[in-house]
Image: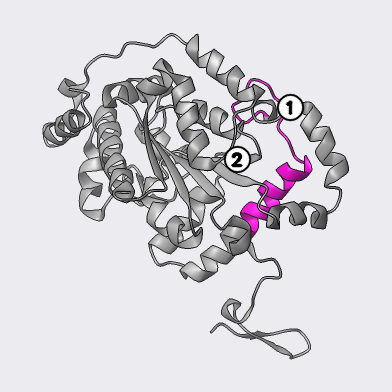
Amino acid sequence: MVEGNYANGTKFGGMNTLTLATDYERVFYNRFVVIAGISRSGTSILGKIVGSLENVVYLFEPAIMRLLPPLAVNSSIDIDLVSKVLEGILFEDYYLQLIQGRNLNIKKSENSFTGNYQQMKAIREKWSKYERRNDALNDVYAGKFVFALKISELHPLLPILEKIFKGIRVIHIIRNGNAVISSSLKRGWYSDEYLNCYMTQLMRQGKPKVPWFVPIEDVEKFCRWNRETRVAYIWRILGKMAMDFGLGNNNYLELRYEDLIKDPKKVATSCEKLLGSQQTGLTMKHIFAIQNHTVSQHEDHSGSIAAEERPFFEEFMKELDYL
């Protein structure tokens, strides 16, 4: 137990002696949904569909999910403490603000634009209906809302998030590995400079730095690999993590990017069933936009992947019926 003293000498106990006034476990119980997928695999597009479903309160890439839960995975912080802090921050600083119509992104060009997920009319109604925190909590405790978020590279956190958010539902989207590599290269990702300066992840020390979820035994080779190999490796190991998590899990839905582009209405219906939420006019708007999307063709990057990683990449591609 961590203890200390106030200025007047009165003792105070550690965090494990404290509790929270709001029952956040009750808030999120069977109401929490995450979209998992590698960057450039369609998570943002899928998020627009999920976030536009009726009574879904949706977060686009809250960085706290990349910064706090890994500390519990690595036992740097006690999981009970992480649970309390994470649930409290997510609800008070993110979801409650959305329910009340506060701190909204009104920049239309961004994926987090609030208009992707709720109409202005609905926001105005929230301003009058949920003036006070307690007004919102009444509907929250009544189970009116589903809390959803998307953040890429979430896969290694799924087992610990399952412990924190009881009844968590997971939507995992997969895309052809060659397409993920091509798209990542165009963005300039996984260069040494990108790894050292631009990732919103906890990183292992190295030259360059390495994402925290890369096993220690693979750090040295990850540092010397080219960008194609790094992306191929991360696509493979994280994809397997999510698929292993989903085995025998009725709260797990696995989707393909290619199916989302080909038949977005069918994919939307699958998400609708998992969440128990109905499609809205905004959902149909996103479905229409996807139907008019032109699919890019991507080259085979196998020849550029390091020889020690290439067989594993090709094996996983075959397992997913991409080869």
Q: In the rendered image of this protein, does residue 260 appear above or below residue 159?
A: above
Which of marks 1 and 2 precedes in the sequence? 2
Q: Nearer the viewer, residue 96 or 282?
A: 282
Using the image, determine if residue 22 lies above or below residue 17.
Answer: above
| Residue 81, placed above or below residue 305 | below
Query: What's the distance in space between the residues labelled 2 and 1, CA to CA?
Result: 16 Å
Q: In the image, is 150 to the left or to the right of 239?
A: right
Compared across the picture, whether 320 is left or right of 285 comes to: left
Relative depth, front residue between 208 and 159: 159
The 10 Å Cα crowd at callout 1, few under 14, some 14 to 19, many 20 or more, is: few
- Residue pictured at 35% horizontal, 50% vertical: 249
> Residue placed at 32% from the left, 11% from the top?
297
Q: Amino acid at mark 2?
A: Leu
Q: Is residue 3 above or below residue 55?
A: below
Please name which of the two marks, 2 or 1, marks the residue nearer to the observer: 1
Check contact, mark 2 vs mark 1: CB within 8 A: no
Report x, y in % for residue 320. 23, 30
Q: Is residue 89 magenta?
A: yes
In screen coordinates, is 258 left or right of 224? Answer: right
Q: Name the quadrant containing residue 235.
A: top left
The amino acid beneath tag 1 is: Gln
The reply to whether the magenta stretch includes residue 303 is: no
Mark 2 highlights which residue?
59
Give the image location of residue 108, x and y in percent. Answer: 68, 21
Provide residue 296's location: percent of width, then percent of height: 37, 11
Residue 150 shows in the view: no
Q: Which mark is residue 119?
A: 1
Q: Which residues are magenta?
A: 88-113
